[in-house]
Image (cartoon, grey):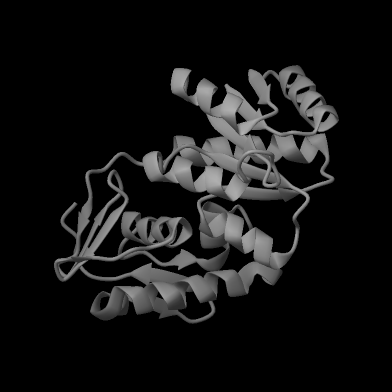
């Protein structure tokens, strides 16, 4: 089941019609209040979320979703298409960000890509690198006994490195897995997040090793 929260009637009806034609179950909501009522009754497989909405904006809704569910796939569909808007949406937990106007074929392809990524997230209790402890279930990072607050994308990036600790992950793979991106234009997004992540982790930031012209890896022996 896919939930679409979109206050524009024409867009909402078009997207729902197109998704159903592609074999998806889909339900649309005009107001956040109607959306939250549906969420209480049934958890969808994926959410399509506009930003500019009556009652409550999409970023606020996204933050509330991430406070209780770090794994539920969310794709932003919005007319706000500046780089700042895109980064804000991704950093607050969106799995993808699609600017209006968009093509239905592209939308359904990216929905399938996000669903594929969510299906292959491994089920582990956590990783222990000594000074650094990571709990995917609790969305928690501990360094030297103290909790470190990360953005959703920072946590995704660190967790992906932990899942593959000891192995070099190419830049293109990290961009695709974490942001659903792979273009040269977005490479600075990865670099900025790695730099911020190292800073927040303090001493544990040294565990993130740069492999020049290739990518990054998390070093150290993990008890997982």
Residue 145 shown left or right of residue 31 in the figure? left
User: Residue 220 falls in which quadrant of the image?
Assistant: bottom left
**In terms of depth relative to the viewer, which is nearer, 118 or 197?**
197
| Residue 222 in the image, given as x and y percentages of width and height | 19, 60
Give coordinates of residue 119: x percent, y percent.
46, 35
| Left or right of 56 in this view: 154 | left
Q: In which quadrant of the rendered view does residue 194 lie?
A: bottom left
Q: Is residue 84 above or below residue 106?
A: below
Determine which quarter of the picture holds residue 181: bottom right
* Residue drawn at the location 33% of the way across and 54% of the way down: 163
Say above or below: 66 vs 36. Answer: below
Of residues 85 and 215, the one drawn nearer to the viewer in this rendering: 85
Q: Which residue is found at the position 60% from the left and 55% from the top?
A: 89
**Residue 83 visible here:** yes
Q: Residue at x 49, y 71 (%)?
A: 193
Residue at image position (44%, 55%) is 152
Q: Is residue 214 above or below residue 111?
A: below
Q: Is residue 207 visible?
A: no
Q: Is residue 69 toward the left or the right of residue 219 in the image?
A: right
Residue 211 in percent (x, y) is at: 44, 78
> Is residue 126 rendered to the left or right of residue 77?
left
x and y, in percent, of residue 208 in the image: 35, 74
Q: Nearer the viewer, residue 53 or 212?
A: 53
Count of number-bearing discs: 0
Q: Which one is in front, 199 or 216?
A: 199
Tell me the quadrant of the picture where the N terminus can be found: top right
């Amino acid at each position: 089941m896919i939930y679409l929260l979109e206050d524009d009637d024409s867009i909402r009806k078009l997207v729902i019609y197109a998704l159903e034609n592609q074999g998806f179950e889909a339900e649309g909501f005009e107001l956040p209040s109607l959306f939250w009522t549906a969420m209480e009754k049934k958890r969808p497989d994926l959410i399509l979320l506009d930003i500019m909405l009556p009652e409550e904006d999409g970023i606020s809704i996204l933050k509330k979703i991430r406070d209780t569910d770090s794994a539920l796939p969310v794709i932003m569909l919005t007319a706000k298409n500046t780089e700042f808007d895109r980064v804000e949406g991704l950093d607050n937990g969106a799995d993808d960000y699609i600017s209006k106007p968009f093509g239905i074929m592209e939308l359904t392809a990216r929905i399938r890509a996000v669903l594929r990524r969510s299906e292959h997230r491994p089920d582990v209790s956590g990783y222990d690198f000594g000074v650094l402890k990571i709990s995917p279930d609790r969305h928690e990072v501990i360094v030297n006994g103290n909790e470190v607050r990360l953005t959703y994308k920072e946590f995704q990036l660190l967790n992906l490195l932990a899942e593959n600790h000891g192995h070099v992950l190419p830049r293109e793979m990290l961009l695709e897995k974490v942001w659903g991106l792979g273009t040269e234009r977005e490479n600075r997004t990865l670099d900025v997040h790695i730099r911020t992540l190292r800073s927040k982790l303090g001493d544990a930031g040294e565990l993130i090793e740069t492999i020049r012209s290739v990518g990054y890896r998390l070093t150290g022996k993990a008890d997982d």
